[in-house]
Amino acid sequence: MAAKVFESIGKFGLALAVAGGVVNSALYNVDAGHRAVIFDRFHGVQDIVVGEGTHCLIPWVQKPIIFDCRSRPRKVPVITGSKDLQNVNITLRILFWAIASHIGEDYDERVLLSITTGILKSAMTRFDAGELITQRELVSNDLTERAATFGLILDDVSLTHLTFGKEFTEAMEAKQKSL
């Protein structure tokens, strides 16, 4: 009699464990500041972007791909030339986040770095080395507008490091000494 009770408890426990495993594999969490898209093995990536919370999916058929949509910083170093053919080393600190409908894996790596380099090089050819210091805001505006077309919102763009070529630096020091 006791053996039958233990046997039925074992079967019930096994059934409960299997049911718990199926329920656990059918749920996923999207943390705060993140978004998810669902990859379906039969239909591909679904168009719906899933927000924060606990959600259901079909186990082994669907898989959530979770993206970080929080604002985060990135430093981008660029070496370019100015209008007066001076070498300029610039480091930009960009605080950005992606619009949920445009997100993708390594999106900031692929898009942000290429547009930053392109915008900086085109902006630097408009100014000579002396004007770069006073025209920082124009570079920030150009970059913000270009990034918006790719689904990136730039909260802050700062030139954190700006150095000129050896010849320009020596000429400026000589000018300072003569004053």
Image: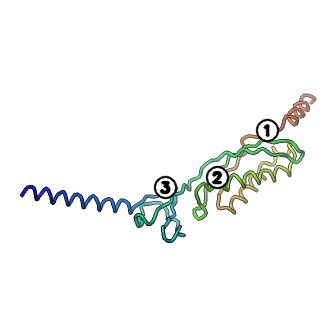
Q: Amino acid at mark 2?
A: Glu
- Mark 2 Cα shell of 10 Å, populated few (<14), some (14-19), many (≥20): few
Is residue 57 left or right of 81 when viewed as pictured? left
| Residue 23 x %, y % | 34, 62
| Nearest to N terminus: mark 3 or mark 1 | 3
Looking at the rendered image, the quarter that the C terminus falls into is: top right
Q: Residue at x 75, y 45 (%)?
A: 78
For mark 3, what is the residue?
32
Q: Secondary structure at mark 1?
A: strand
Q: Residue at x 74, y 40 (%)?
A: 161
| Nearest to N terminus: mark 2 or mark 3 | 3
State the CA–CA distance, disc 2 to disc 1: 25 Å
State the CA–CA distance, disc 3 to disc 1: 39 Å
For mark 1, what is the residue?
163
For the view shown, which residue lies furthest in the top direction?
A: 177
Q: Amino acid at mark 3?
A: Ala
Q: Nearer the viewer, residue 158 or 37?
A: 37
Q: Which mark is residue 27?
A: none
Q: Amino acid at mark 1?
A: Thr
Looking at the rendered image, the quarter that the N terminus falls into is: bottom left
| Residue 149 x %, y % | 69, 63
Q: Which mark is residue 109?
A: 2
| Nearest to N terminus: mark 2 or mark 1 | 2
- Mark 3 Cα shell of 10 Å, populated few (<14), some (14-19), many (≥20): few
